[in-house]
């Protein structure tokens, strides 16, 4: 829920504040992905990291398309899709990095408990 709900909330807030995804979306995507990595099991880590770019792109596409349906008709949809991918890449990388950071912290903490 955190991995999808927080980015969606951030995207809606950014879309209401002005056109396109912005800082709120980026922060919510990173926070949601990091929180999902903190809450999931060791087996779920792969899914959180691998799904974060898909979630970012999907949320961006749904919110942008829903808010600007008239803009994304015909060739506009192909152009918009390319724009969502290019502009979303930094957010995708930040979200994946947040998950990896949480995973590293959990691994280090678990090892300290075992040896401590």
Image (spheres, rainbow, N blue to C red):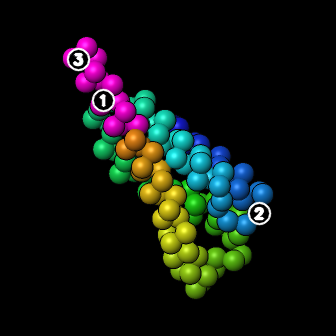
Residue 78 appears at what percent x and percent y?
Answer: 53, 80
Q: Secondary structure at mark 1?
A: helix
- In percent of the image, x 33 and y 37: which residue is there? 104
Q: CA distance from mark 2 to mark 1?
A: 41 Å
Q: Secondary structure at mark 3?
A: helix
Residue 68 falls left or right of residue 7: right
Residue 106 appears at what percent x and percent y?
Answer: 35, 30
Any mark on residue 108, and which?
A: 1
Rendering quarter of residue 98: top left
2 vs 1, front mark: 1
Residue 58 appears at what percent x and percent y?
Answer: 51, 59
- Choose between 110 and 8: the one closer to the eye: 110
The vertical placement of 100 against 105, above or below, is: below
Residue to which mark 3 is pinned: 114
Q: Within 10 Å of the Cα at label 2, are there few (<14), some (14-19), or many (20+) other Cα atoms?
A: few
Residue to which mark 2 is pinned: 18
The vertical placement of 75 against 69, above or below, is: below
């Amino acid at each position: 829920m955190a991995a999808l709900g927080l980015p969606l909330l951030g995207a809606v807030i950014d879309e209401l504040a002005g056109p396109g995804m912005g800082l709120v979306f980026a922060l919510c995507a990173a926070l949601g992905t990091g929180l999902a990595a903190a809450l999931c099991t060791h087996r779920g880590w792969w899914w959180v990291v691998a799904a974060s770019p898909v979630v970012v792109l999907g949320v961006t596409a749904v919110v942008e398309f829903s808010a600007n349906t008239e803009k994304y008709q015909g060739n506009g949809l192909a152009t918009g899709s390319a724009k969502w991918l290019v502009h979303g890449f930094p957010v995708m990388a930040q979200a994946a990095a947040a998950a990896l950071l949480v995973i590293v912290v959990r691994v280090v903490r678990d090892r300290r408990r075992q040896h401590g």
